[in-house]
Each structure stands twice: as C-alpha cells, then as structure tokens.
Image (tube, grey):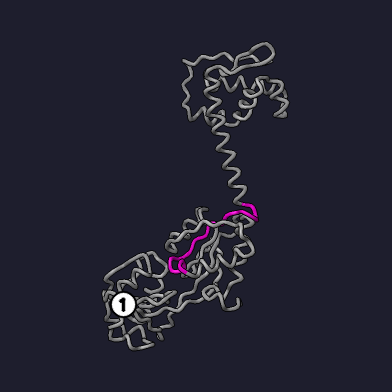
Amino acid sequence: MYVSARIDAVSYEASSADVSASIAPLLVQFATVAREEHITRAAALLGIAQPTLSRTMARLEADVGVPLLARTGRGVVLTRQGHTLLGYVEQALGVLERGLDEVIEDAGPVRGKVAFGFLHTMGPEAVPGLLRAFRVDHPGIRFQLVQASASAMLERMRAGELDLCLTAPLPDAPDLAVRALDEQRMYLVVPTDHRLATRRRVRLAEAADEVFVCMEPGYGLRRITDALFAEAGFTPKVAFEGEEAETLRGLVAAGLGVALLPAPDSPRPGTVELAVTAPRAFRTIGLAWVPGRPETAPVRLFREFVLGRRGSLLHPEKPAR
C-alpha cells in the first residue's frame, strides 16, 4: 500500500529546473495514479508492480518537496498541491503528444514534410514547376520552403534545419553530397538605351569600364560573377549590391549600371539581355544534402525525383537525361 514520504519543504534547496529534470520520467505514472485514485489499478494499467509504483510516487513527492497524494482507505486522492501539479502535467503531456504526432506525420510517406532550400533566382518559375510535377504522384507531401544565399542554406542544412537544397555554385565540401542537375546561361543585362543594347552577343571584357550592380558578397551568384570577371581580366566597379536578381534588373532599367545575371523567366521592361561569348558564362545548379543522415520517406522520394530531372530542371518541357 502507498505510504507518503516524509516531506521537509523548508530544507529543500534544489532549483525547479533540477526538479523538472528529475521528475520528468515520472509524469505519466503520476497522471495515471491521479486519474485512477488507486495505486494497484494504476500499476496494472502501466504494466508495473504495485510496490514499484508506490516507491515511485514516494520518490516524486520527495523530489518535489510537498505532499501530492493522500491515502483514503484503499485508494488515494490528490492534495491541493497535487491538483495544481496535475494540471501542468496534463498540459505538458498534451504538448508532447502533439509534438510526437507532428514528427511522426512529417516522416510518413503520404503526408510527410520536406524542408527544401533553393536560390532566390529559382523561386518564380523553376521551383514551383518542380513541386507541381512532384505532387502529381505525391499530393499529400508538404514542403517547408526556404530561400536564402547558398552559404546560409548549406549551413542550415548542416544544422539539420533543411533536408535538401538547390544551390550554385556546387559546394566542394567533404561533408556534403552534391549532384549537378542543369546549366544556366549568364547574360550581360544593360538598359535599352545602352551603347551595347543593339548587340546580341558581347565579350565580357567589353564591359570592363561599366558600372555594375551585383549580388551581395556571400551569395553564390556573386561568387560566380566574380570568377567570370576575373577570367575576363578585370575587377568591376560596383555601385550597388542587393539580395534579389529582380531588384538588380530594376536598377539596370533605371540606368544605374549593368549586371551579369541568369535570364529572367519573363523579359524585364527597360533592359536587354546580351549573351556572353567569352568567357563561357554559365552556372551549374545542383542538389546538395548531408549523406549518412537518417532521412524520412518524403525526403528520399523528393530527392530521387529531383535527381531524375537532370538536364530538365530549368526547362520542364525537355526530357530528363
């Protein structure tokens, strides 16, 4: 039979955090005893021996430092302090159950979730088309979509916040798995009244004296353009730096500089796109993930789908290679 532990609350000096860590594994047992108001019945429901449960409840009271249960004949009832604690215990167990439901659902092959990062420049058309094609066969799978710089996405993926990311340039990192998927041509973007606007092609060196607008340092596109400028033999004069390719095109249209960017999904009024013939101006877009990390069925399904789009990632109408 349950015997209440002797409590000396005045001498109890442990912090509430210490007590929480100590009693957390006992909360389900306490809630069961409270609901049943009977140690033997609660022990049977929990599948443990009655003496073991009695000792556990005595330990719980000793850890908390106040009486939680009072004996009444063959059963027990909660003290006022026990009722107070039970309210918080039930809230905590409810939150835990909801959290477990969420992570279990996230891992399910039908209604699971994929945390997917991608470049800003792929947001308007390429990624929506990719997701639309994937959800034809997997309509219930959900996505957490993240747009950020290449370096920020890779760090979030390493930290476990992202499952997969589309990135460029391809990272050369031993802790990441990377697969090239497609190439995207880079263009010199100039205002419609620019001296080169009537041309269709241009060597990048012909723009060496121009003022440029560029992505901010740290973005993958900035690393690519800086490498192309170096290959062309000059360091550009940069007047503006931004985080969005469309913002840069707006600056070009306003006559504030020229830019080296991938082609937009739709033409931007006030600008002209010139193909760069030298150096070879392309960026390679690929899929990256952390190999060896446990993965859910939705992540595996989506990764295999994206890898199957090699050669047609940017052009869904083309057959995959």
Compare residues 177 and 181 and report the one nearer the observer: 181
Count up the numbered dots: 1
**Rendered location of residue 182, percent (x, y):** 53, 75
**Rendered location of residue 28, percent (x, y):** 62, 30
Q: Check disc 1 and report the residue beneath it.
A: 258
Residue at the spot 56% in from the left edge and 28% down from the top edge = 23
Quarter of the image for residue 193 reads: bottom left
**Rendered location of residue 223, percent (x, y):** 40, 70
Q: Which residues are magenta?
A: 107-124
* SS at badge 1: loop
Residue at the spot 56% in from the left edge and 25% down from the top edge = 86
Compare residues 150 and 98 and report the one nearer the observer: 98
Position above or below: 169 against 114: below
Label 1 is placed on what type of residue?
Answer: Val
Position above or below: 321 against 81: below
How many other residues sit within 10 Å of disc 1, few (<14), some (14-19) or many (≥20)?
Answer: many
Give the farthest residue toward the top.
73
Quarter of the image for residue 185 reads: bottom left
Quarter holding the C terminus?
bottom right
Residue at the spot 34% in from the left edge and 71% down from the top edge = 248
| In magenta stretch: residue 226 | no
**Rendered location of residue 88, percent (x, y):** 53, 29
Q: Is residue 241 left or right of residue 10?
A: left
| In magenta stretch: residue 120 | yes
Quarter holding the N terminus?
top right
Position above or below: 145 against 171: above
Position above or below: 147 against 183: above
